[in-house]
Image: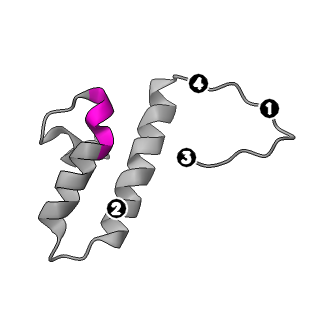
């Protein structure tokens, strides 16, 4: 998502916490972009964002608060 500087070589981590941080950041950005009118479309978009995990429709709504 974010481009790291070349001076700091960092191996790609599959750390669940980092994955969750990236997902939360995406959710936050989508929330900022979506107005109150398009909140339903927002959750549809979020489901597509997290579809890599094959998440159930309601899972990503509670993601920021609890565990992943």
Categorize mark 1 by other alpha carbons within 10 Å: few (<14), some (14-19), many (20+): few
Q: Name the residue under label 2.
A: 30
Q: In this view, does 24 lie to the left or right of 2?
A: left
Residue that carries the numbered disc 3 in the rendered image: 1
Separation (CA) of disc 2 from disc 1: 29 Å
* Alpha-carbon span between mark 4 and mark 1: 12 Å
Residue located 12% across and 62% down the image: 40
Q: Which of 15 and 45 is in front in this view?
A: 45
Name which quarter of the figure residue 31 lies in: bottom left
Q: Which of marks 4 and 3 is in front?
A: 3
Left or right: residue 56 compared with residue 65: left
Disc 4 or 2, which lies upstream in sequence? Answer: 4
**Residue at 45% from the left image edge and 25% from the top image edge:** 16
Q: Mark 4 points at which residue?
A: 13
- In this rendering, does residue 63 appear at all? yes
Magenta stretch bounds: 49-53
Circles 4 and 1 in contact, beta carbons < 8 Å: no
Relative to 1, residue 37 above or below: below
Q: Give the main secondary structure of the magenta stretch.
A: helix
Q: How far apart are marks 3 and 1 (CA)?
A: 15 Å
For the point 25% across and 44% down, the residue is 48
Sequence order check: which comes first, mark 3 or mark 1? 3
- Name the disc covering residue 50, or none: none
Residue in front for this viewpoint, 5 or 66: 5
As measured in the structure, the alpha-carbon distance from the residue carrying label 4 to the one carrying label 2 is 24 Å
Q: Which of marks 2 and 3 is nearer the N terminus?
A: 3
Give the alpha-carbon distance from disc 2 to disc 3, as whole Å.
14 Å
Residue 44 location, x and y as percent? 17, 53
């Amino acid at each position: 998502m974010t481009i790291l500087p070349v001076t700091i070589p960092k191996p790609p981590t599959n750390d669940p916490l980092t994955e969750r941080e990236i997902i939360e950041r995406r959710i936050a950005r989508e929330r900022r972009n979506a107005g109150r009118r398009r909140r339903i479309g927002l959750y549809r978009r979020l489901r597509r964002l997290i579809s890599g995990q094959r998440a159930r429709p309601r899972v990503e709504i509670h993601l920021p608060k609890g565990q992943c």
